[in-house]
Image (cartoon, coloured by chain):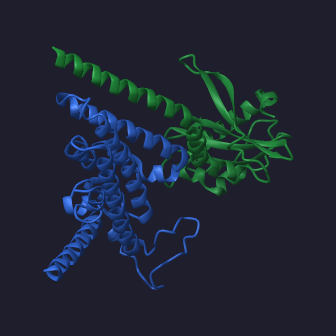
Amino acid sequence: MRDIVRMVVVLTLIGALSGLTLSAIHRVTRAPIEYQTIKFVKEPAVKKVLTGYENDPIADRKKIVVGVDEKGRPLEVIIFPAKKAGVTFAVALEGRGKGFGGLIGVMVGVSRDGALLDIGITAHSETPGVGSKVAEASFTDRFKGLPLTKGLTVDAISGATYSSRGVVAAVEQAVGYVSKFSKEIF
Amino acid sequence: MSITDEFTKGLWKTVAPFRLVLGLCPTLAVTTSGINGIGMGLATTFVLVFSNLFVSLLRRFIPTQVRIASFIVIIASFVVIVELVMQAYFYPLFKILGIFIPLIVVNCIILGRAEAFASKNGLLVSLADGLGIGIGFTLSLFVLGSLRELLGSGTLLFYDSSHPGFHVMWESFEPFTFMLKPPGAFVALGLLLGAMNLISRHQARKGG
């Protein structure tokens, strides 16, 4: 009986101490891990759509709540601001649209005066060789400099209508966030 | 055996991947370049040293019936620490080593040292043992990784994607991409093991 009590006590103590240490370490590393993950996953796309900034858009990122998801949790979008002399002149943010093979993630650069700077595809699962052409510069360049005031019109890639529409939907979602929450963003 | 003996035995006499043929899973899987080998080796060394330290500290306190469970909890805690720290500060390396970082938990070198050595020996010798075995493991992985990197891609340690033109081998060298594939790992391990046996035999003959 004494043995069993001792085993239980020892294992409980070791488990509790380990849990305590790990939660402390987790607390310390949470912010750097988030920064690193965003930096390595999103930075290439952010760099493509924003130019001429002097700050670190990843470090200066902010989250805005754009709505709630189906479970009632707040839906957040990360905004990457491009600043020159402390003034935000453009932002990059990600929108999603339904393509042929699933959701297409598009990083969209929007300038303060409401022009579309550039877009970059961050994630897609479109048909290789057909729908995947939307990720190429020949397609993404068609969005450069479009005004945001009226609906987007872009020549689709023939044979990849759904994929093209998916990208347009993603861009429109991102642009929609910008016009709806422009006060918080700029 | 003295502390120095405990430390140096891990460097040559019982160097884990070659002499004991233990811990082969990470040894073969991640050593596609020298720097990967060092990263994996250092992560394992960290876990090994601290698990040895704590197992040795707690050896009188842990009942024998639950010792394996306790060791695993201790080892797993340090593995999670390594994983979090690596993810926070060495993200590219973390991405490359991937699943093999959490799998350090089941690396039999670490549980083996905890069970066979640290649970029976004092604090200082256990530390020396962990450090020796760990550094031996790191060196083995580094040598194996460098060999594979040299033959498989014609580059060495300082290579990274930012300056891809850097080649150690002569200009017309055609890399054996085979060496970077899993079978190449076995071939490289076999070659190194053969070389080590050759050196040992030579030493034994010279010694008497």
In the image, B128: left or right of A67? left
Towards the viewer: A19 or A130: A19
Spot the green chain and give its letter: A
Which residue is rendered at x = 32% and y = 57% of the image? B132
Spot the blue chain and give its letter: B
Q: Position of residue B31 (x, y in %)?
A: 36, 61
Residue B172 in view here: yes
Residue A16's place in the image compared with A77, above or below, is: above
Q: Quadrant of residue A74?
A: top right
Q: Where is residue A121 in the image (x, y as percent from the top left)?
A: 61, 47
In the image, A173: left or right of A135? right
Which residue is rendered at x = 49% and y = 77% of the image? B167
Q: How many labels does the image show?
A: 0
In the image, B143: left or right of A151? left
Which residue is rendered at x = 14% and y = 81% of the image? B205
Towards the viewer: B30 or A134: B30
Q: Residue furthest top?
A: A1
Q: Quadrant of the N terminus of chain A?
A: top left
Towards the viewer: B145 or B112: B112
Residue B93's place in the image compared with A74, above or below, is: below
Q: Where is residue B105 in the image (x, y as percent from the top left)?
A: 31, 42
Q: Quadrant of residue A146?
A: top right
Residue B138's place in the image compared with B83, above or below, is: below
Residue A156 in view here: no
Which residue is rendered at x = 22% and y = 32% of the image? B67
Q: Quadrant of the C terminus of chain A?
A: top right
Residue A57's place in the image compared with A26, above or below, is: below
Towards the viewer: A121 or B56: B56
Q: Position of residue B27 (x, y in %)?
A: 30, 58
Q: Residue furthest front?
A: B2
